[in-house]
Amino acid sequence: METMERREEDNRAGNKPEENKPEENNQDEEHYEEKLRRALIPSFWLTQLLSLLLGGFLLWFFYLRQGYPWQDFLAWDSTWSIWGLSTVLAVSMMGLQILAWKIFSPDAFDDGGINRLLLELPSQFLLPMFIIGAFSEELLIRGVIQTGLAGFFGPVYGILFTSLIFTGMHFRYLKKPLLIVAAFVISVCLCLLYGFAGTLWATVYAHFLYNFGAALLAKKYYLPLLAREKKINS
């Protein structure tokens, strides 16, 4: 009787029952995801456009304007380096990605929902996004930053500092140690590939192939893991 009277008093006072709170939390989460989804594609293209413009301007200002030929950055005379080594590197990183999904919990890869929403986009949307994204980032990171830092500090420290900058650019990963380590390792691999191949086409192709391949694999392996975990926790 006392419990029933207390519930009646709570209802008269306008207090909501405890069982309504999970429903409210779900509604808040869905509202947040919808806002994030609407902003995802415009913000992605804006970021890549800025990277492309900045990378192109800095490449011209520090190198092309000083007499460096553009072939020093975008040579197409090493087919094996571009297609062979880049493919091996990208496939190896995809293999490590699958292994990581099997070892670590899905929460270790959660960057606030951005990657998941990106992966849920249709593949035909992801293809041009990853092509332009790979080119703009490699032009700025490897073409401008690594070239400059390696020339000033030497190749080893150039790779180290470039990878720290690349990792810092993925600031949404800062609270996820696994994602931070992964971004740093991927950058080191791409820096080594650029140093060996001597052309940005190699790193652009490897960057794109890894991103797009990992996205396709995530649709098959990672997203079902997330859905299963969400179902268990609900």
Image: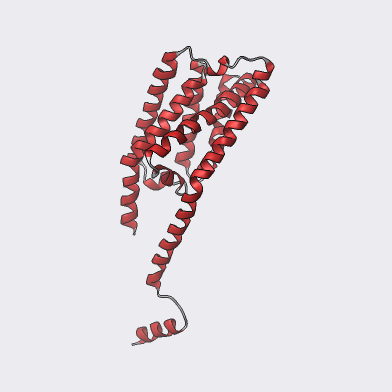
The answer to whether 24 is drawn above or below residue 157 in the figure is below
Percent coordinates x, y for residue 135 in the rendering: 51, 28
Q: Which residue corresponds to the image point at 46% horizontal and 13% vertical from the top-left? A: 78
- Number of residue marks: 0
Please, which residue is most extreme toward the top here? 77
Image coordinates of residue 138 in percent, x first then y, are 53, 27
| Residue 185, percent from left and from top | 47, 30
For the point 64% across and 19% down, the residue is 64
Relative to 150, 111 lies left or right: left
Q: Is residue 232 above or below residue 51?
A: below
Q: Residue at coordinates 40% horizontally, 33% vertically from top-left? A: 212
Q: Position of residue 155 (x, y in %)?
A: 57, 19
Decide which of 38, 223 is in the foreground and name it.
38
Residue 160 showing in the rendered view: no
**Quadrant in which residue 7 is drawn:** bottom left
Taking 221 as reference, is 66 left or right?
Answer: right
Q: Quick check: 233 left or right of 45?
A: left
Q: Quadrant of the N terminus?
A: bottom left
Give the image's coloring scheme. Answer: secondary structure
Q: Quadrant of residue 215?
A: top left
The residue nearer to you, when weighing 103 against 211, is: 211
